[in-house]
Image: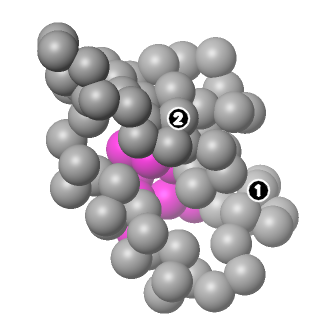
């Protein structure tokens, strides 16, 4: 979910990246511990790239209490 705000947008990332570490690592993420993070690695990678390209002010995760601010 993308949220637009005067001070910058935010992304509620859902299951696109379970943790802030996965989001930051992108294609280099070690997902061995996260069985089920993706069904199709190429499609997942493209989706994550699109989320990075948004350059959101804040990214909120469903499976992680960290919030990434840029």
Q: In this rendering, does residue 39 appear at all?
A: yes
The residue located at (69%, 33%) in the rendering is: 62
Q: Residue furthest top?
A: 7
Q: Quadrant of residue 11?
A: top left
Q: Which residues are magenta?
A: 21-30
Residue where numbered disc 2 is placed: 12
The residue located at (23%, 49%) in the rendering is: 54
**42 vs 4: above or below:** below
Front position in the image: 2 or 23:
2
Q: How was this image coloured?
A: one colour
Q: In this rendering, does residue 28 appear at all?
A: no
Q: Is residue 26 left or right of residue 6?
A: right
User: Element type at marker 1?
Assistant: loop
Check if residue 17 falls in the magenta segment.
no
Front position in the image: 64 or 31:
64
Front position in the image: 57 or 30:
57
User: Element type at marker 2?
Assistant: strand
The residue located at (82%, 64%) in the rendering is: 35
**14 vs 70: above or below:** below
The residue located at (68%, 72%) in the rendering is: 38
Secondary structure mostly seen in magenta is helix
Q: Is residue 60 left or right of residue 65?
A: left
Quarter in which the C terminus is drawn: top left
Q: Closer to the camera: disc 2 or disc 1?
A: 2
Q: Quadrant of residue 33?
A: bottom right
Residue where numbered disc 1 is placed: 34
Q: Position of residue 44 (x, y in %)?
A: 53, 74
Q: Position of residue 46 (x, y in %)?
A: 39, 76
- Comes first in the chain, label 2 or label 1: 2
**14 vs 39: above or below:** above
């Amino acid at each position: 979910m993308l949220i637009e705000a005067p001070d910058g947008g935010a992304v509620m990332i859902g299951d696109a990246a379970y943790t802030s570490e996965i989001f930051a690592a992108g294609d280099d993420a070690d997902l061995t511990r996260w069985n089920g993070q993706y069904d199709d690695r190429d499609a997942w990678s493209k989706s994550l790239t699109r989320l990075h390209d948004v350059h959101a002010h804040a990214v909120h995760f469903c499976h992680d209490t960290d919030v990434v601010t840029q």
